[in-house]
Image (spheres, rainbow, N blue to C red):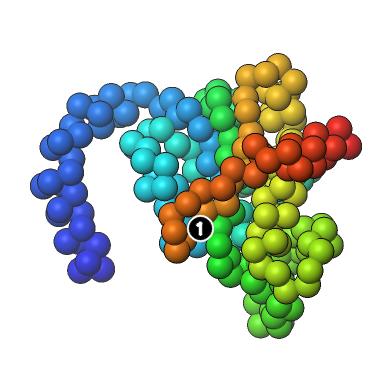
Amino acid sequence: MRDFANGIERFQRDVFPAKEELFAHLAAHHTPHTLFIGCSDARVVPELITGSEPGELFVIRTAGNLVPAYTPGADGVAASIEYAVAALGVRDVVVCGHSGCGAMTALAHGHDLSGAPAVADWLRLADASVARTATSGDVSALVRQNVLAQLANLATHPSVARALAERKVTIRGWVFDIATGRVEDLTVAGHAAADLATAFAA
């Protein structure tokens, strides 16, 4: 906690004064332009990767950047998506996977998750991604398949489906490579666009 205390002190002394006008504006305005759905992994920092200022991203982080397909009922991920799209009116949605993802590594290598039953249950949301990955044990391929699968799940949410139909929002699937800092946009590749079109039509 001492590190946190020192960090807060540095923020208040060095960072906040330089951005005081921005924070004064943000105190009364919440208008992010993008919903960023990423992995909970501590190495993946959405604002750092995108060079975004406070207030620009509405961020959801889940293990494996998983997005459950829509079902009625209380669901924190669904509620956050709905709020970002329907209430805040974000213009873009990004689902971002990353290299060396622990969740995808566990699935690709068949790790024993019996000691973490909640994790095991959550990762079953990626069963379709595992089934679509051609080579067993290929973590990189699974990461990519998983991003595409989560985009398809995202489109089942009524607020997203409506915004897509009205052309009020665009959605993209990214993969962030931790070692190089590169970001690959899967939705600009021809095969990915075809996969997404098929998924959204289903």
Within 10 angstroms of label 1, few (less than 14), some, or many (20 or more) residues? Answer: some
Residue to which mark 1 is pinned: 177
Residue under the image location 63 percent in, 28 percent down: 170
Q: Residue furthest front?
A: 190
- Specify the quadrant of the image occupied by residue 85: top right
Is residue 50 found left or right of 130 in the rendered image? left
**Count of labels shown?**
1
- Between 35 and 171, the residue placed more toward the observer is 171
- Between 101 and 71, the residue placed more toward the observer is 101
User: Residue 147: horizontal and vertical position, in percent?
Assistant: 67, 50
Is residue 128 found left or right of 44 in the rendered image? right
Res. 192 in view: yes
User: Residue 88: horizontal and vertical position, in percent?
Assistant: 52, 25
Q: Residue furthest right?
A: 202
Is residue 26 found left or right of 116 in the rendered image? left
Residue under the image location 75 percent in, 49 percent down: 149
Res. 117 in view: no
Q: Is residue 201 above or below residue 103?
A: above
Residue under the image location 85 percent in, 37 percent down: 198
Residue under the image location 58 percent in, 40 percent down: 94
Q: Residue furthest top?
A: 166
Amino acid type, callout 1: Asp
- Between 45 and 173, the residue placed more toward the observer is 173
Is the C terminus in the top left, top right, bottom left or bottom right quadrant? Answer: top right
Is the N terminus in the top left, top right, bottom left or bottom right quadrant? Answer: bottom left
User: Residue 195: horizontal and vertical position, in percent?
Assistant: 80, 42
Q: Secondary structure at mark 1?
A: loop
User: Residue 14: horizontal and vertical position, in percent?
Assistant: 12, 46
Q: Is residue 54 above or below residue 120?
A: above
